[in-house]
Amino acid sequence: MSATAIAEPTAEVRAATRAVYLAFIGAGFTMASWATRIPQVRDELGLNPSRLGLVLLAIAAGSIVSLVLAGQIVARFGSRRTVTAMAGLLLVALSAVGIGYPYGVAPVVVGLFFFGFANGAWDVAMNVQGAVVERRLGKAIMPRFHAGYSVGTVAGALAGAAAVALHLPVTAHLVVSAVMVGVVVILAVRNFAPDEADPQAGGDQGGGGLRRTLATWREPRTLLIGAFVLAFAFAEGAGIDWISISVIDGYGAPATIGTLAFAVFLAAMTVGRWFGPALLDRYGRVVVVRGLAVISLAGLMLFVFGPDTSTAFAGALLWGLGASLGFPVGMSAAADEPAMAPARVSVVASIGYCAFLGGPPLVGFLGDHVTVLKALTAVAVLLAVAAAVAGNLRPVPATTSDLTNSERF
């Protein structure tokens, strides 16, 4: 760790750390708030699994469009202003879904597209800021930021379960969630630390920055990290989108039980992300994520082929625990070199979010033929891919003067 990083005011770093946690928590809370109401929206609109998959595709489509642009957006406007703007957009988009769903599919699709767009740029910006804080602290903390996302999803899932049990209207639930998160995050991110500019790119303004961003799409390591993140994002996204419905439809459980199974999955991811940094510091990225891929695969098989809801809950727990570190470790690997972090995080996130683009319709179409529960076995193939390419996560030395303990994690 350099003298510059050591001299950073402790109060400023702590404030930035808290702000990053709140950004992750807010993103997770809103995503889970929407996910817990998917069964009710599906029933209101009369959607079968394949049509529901296409509706969910709107989130991924918005995210992909946003992620392609996110490297340039974050480099030009900074992570603080990007998250601020996207929090405002998300507030409007999720409220539009809640207000519009009784009127048909069209307002839901439009609202979900902009919901996904806001999430995409927000995701890149908060990961870039997380990497800044991680380097200034000099220790692995990115998985804990993503644990903050999981804390948000657990809180959102439990709030959603309560809303379902109390028969709270979908509109009231989604609008209140959107407004609450939007206001809190907009206020919190004022404490983000200054982004680390690339001295050779002039802040990535203009064509030079665009050429640099495009060049990252030809880097083998970056692309393979993207493939790794895609696989784990598919495992995570399939759980978020389909666990509740699988338990309800596949095991004949009531809606509240399905939502609680979803909460167990998210809680397991939170535990893995909170305690994962110690394993990463001790054993390194590659060994840890390969082991977790095996755990996630075992949980998936137990969830799909178990005899009753108790084994489904156990499977959801192992599935979530195993899937916990893939996305955050991939983000840290993409951000190993600070000067290229915005561009590389954007590329890796763009590839990873293709899982959210292709995942819902793939599971939905398979679900029409073999049930949604059995369709989830498609996750196993990508987990095997993740284990195969995990060697590319080995850290590379930072090229700037702020090299820290990141070589260890």
Image (cartoon, rainbow, N blue to C red):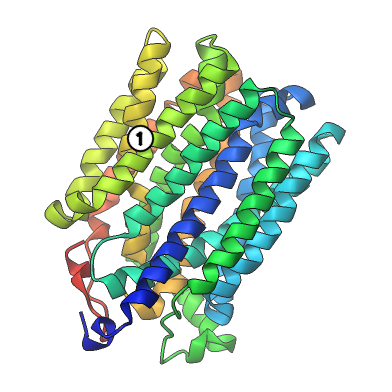
Instruction: Name the image quarter holding the C terminus.
Output: bottom left
Tell me if residue 105 comes above or below residue 120 in the rendering.
above
Residue 70 placement (x, y as % from top left)? 56, 68
Identify the residue at image location x=67%, y=49%.
178
The residue singled out by tag 1 in the image is 268
To which quarter of the image does residue 220 belong?
bottom left
Horizontal side of 222 relative to 259 (left or right) equals left
In the image, residue 255 sits, relative to residue 69, either above or below, namely above
Residue ID at (60%, 48%): 60
Is residue 364 visible in the rendered image? The answer is no
Q: Nearer the viewer, residue 159 or 325?
A: 159
Label 1 Cα neighbours within 10 Å, binned few <14 / some 14-19 / many ≥20:
many
Q: Say which quadrant the N terminus sits in.
A: bottom left
Q: Nearer the viewer, residue 229 or 37?
A: 37
Q: Is residue 93 above or below residue 341?
A: above
Type of residue at label 1? Ala
Q: Quadrant of residue 72?
A: bottom right
